[in-house]
Image (cartoon, helix red, strand yellow):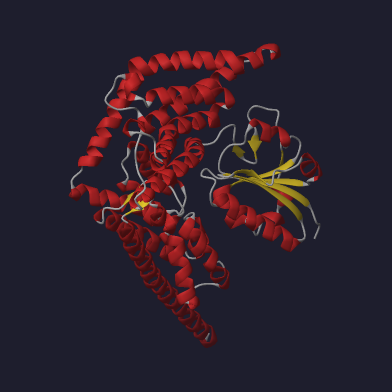
Amino acid sequence: MEKYKIVAITNCPAGIAHTYMVAEAFEKRARELGHEIHVETQGASGVENHLTDEQIAEADYVILAMGKSLTDSDRARFNGKKVINLKVSDALKEAKTIFDHLEERSELFEGEKPNVKLGKQNTPQGSIMSHLMAGISAALPFVIGGGVLVALANVLMRFGLPYTGFEDGGASFAWIMEQVGYLGFKFMIPIMGAYIANSIGDKPALAPAFIITYFANDNTMLGTESGCGFFGAIFFGLAIGYFVKWIKGFNYPQAVKSLMNLTIIPFLTILIFGTLTFYLVGPLLGGLMSGMLNFLNGVPAEFKLPLAFLIGAMLAFDMGGPINKIAWFFCFSLVAEKVYIWYAIVGVVASVPPVAAGLASMIWPNMFSKEERDTAVSAIVVGATVATEPAIPFAMADPIPMITANTLSGGLTGVVTILLGIERLAPGIGVFDPLLGLMTPGWAFYLAYAFGVATNILFIVVFKKMRIKHTAKKLAEKQQQEILQGKVIEEK
């Protein structure tokens, strides 16, 4: 078999799990086949293992496992190369076979064209969800860092350290930590809007979207009861991003392009959207946000529990996929409005499927393949601290029992989370969140989490046994039919 030099890029909307899991799978398979491979990851930590110009120039093939659109600079890097494009969500399934069909699947990449075709997929831009997740990924460090500082301030106060502001005779350390932490929450929404717009319209959209989203989220500047919150981040991020993309699409003389991007486009965008925000959009979205918050804070228990079941089931259903992201985004966006109970469902449910799958494969190894058992420890550790995606290989191997078990357990765990009154202040590191003060009360979190893992394991065993029994029955029936057919042939 011919040996190739290959470079690859992996990214996913959230930049947390798929990005790195796919990179590892590519590297492992390429080494097994004797290929030389270099993989650049574009995750939540930024670009890592950046591909050099020399590596790209020497590469026989480029593999792009993408969950969000390529930047203009990335397109330019791969101009003239043989490129294989696939969705990052499909890459884990194809990691073992993609290297066997490089030539058939590759297409010549022409990066200088505005509408770049990657394989059979036209990707001048990503999906709406990929743009939203680009904004969330950028906002995460703000709310995580801010949330940890707020939690630290609360821990210090519990240990008896003073909590005083300037008006009380001087700012104490705990007070300063809390104020700095709340800045993370304050800037989370503008950053989200800015990077949604940046994902669509590139750098000229960044500053206008930040300024307008900040303006729209400040109810004192708008003179409204509430700011626009995450509605504003979504609306202005998308609207400004596409507006800037439209303006950039005109064929300007080369001499004025830099002037357009640096001065004219930001000025026009801020002027137009600033005016619209103050007189029209701001009051409308602010009223919508106020109404939603009043509803969520006052929703009766008979409606709250079904909603909790739905959110928990969605989070566990496709393990980091689009349905999971919709539920996650809804809960996460409410954190900026200081509504924490729904985000607590994410904190409990999201890490249950991988931990349950890993433990089940260790307790009942005969129900799982060797490959699944080999990933058990990794699934438990990564799942308990980072993301839901390590449950994907288990679901791929046996979809119906695993997905059914995850979904039912996720829904029930969501209900238990609401019943116990758990709150989550910010994203953290999974099962350690209560120790950082990010999940309260801590005992309730661990009770709900234990319930989720236990029920998920129970459902996995029950549904897998049902599937095994059904498969055995079908096999017996098939063998019986073959025996009968053989007898008929003999008699003839």
Foreground: 85 or 166?
A: 166
Q: Residue at x 29, y 29 (%)?
A: 288
Does residue 35 appear left or right of residue 12 in this picture? right
Q: Note whether 102 is above or below 458 in the view shown.
A: above
Q: Is residue 323 visible?
A: no
Q: Position of residue 446 (x, y in %)?
A: 35, 62
Q: Position of residue 272 (x, y in %)?
A: 45, 14
Q: Position of residue 430 (x, y in %)?
A: 44, 56
Which residue extends farthest front? Answer: 169
Does residue 489 appear left or right of residue 409 in this picture? right
Foreground: 18 or 333?
A: 333
| Total count of labels | 0
Q: Residue at x 50, y 35 (%)?
A: 131
Q: Note whether 201 is above or below 328 in the view shown.
A: above
Q: Residue at x 39, y 45 (%)?
A: 153
Q: In the picture, which quadrant includes the N terminus?
A: bottom right
Specify the quadrant of the image occupied by residue 284: top left
Foreground: 106 or 214?
A: 214
Q: Residue at x 41, y 48 (%)?
A: 152
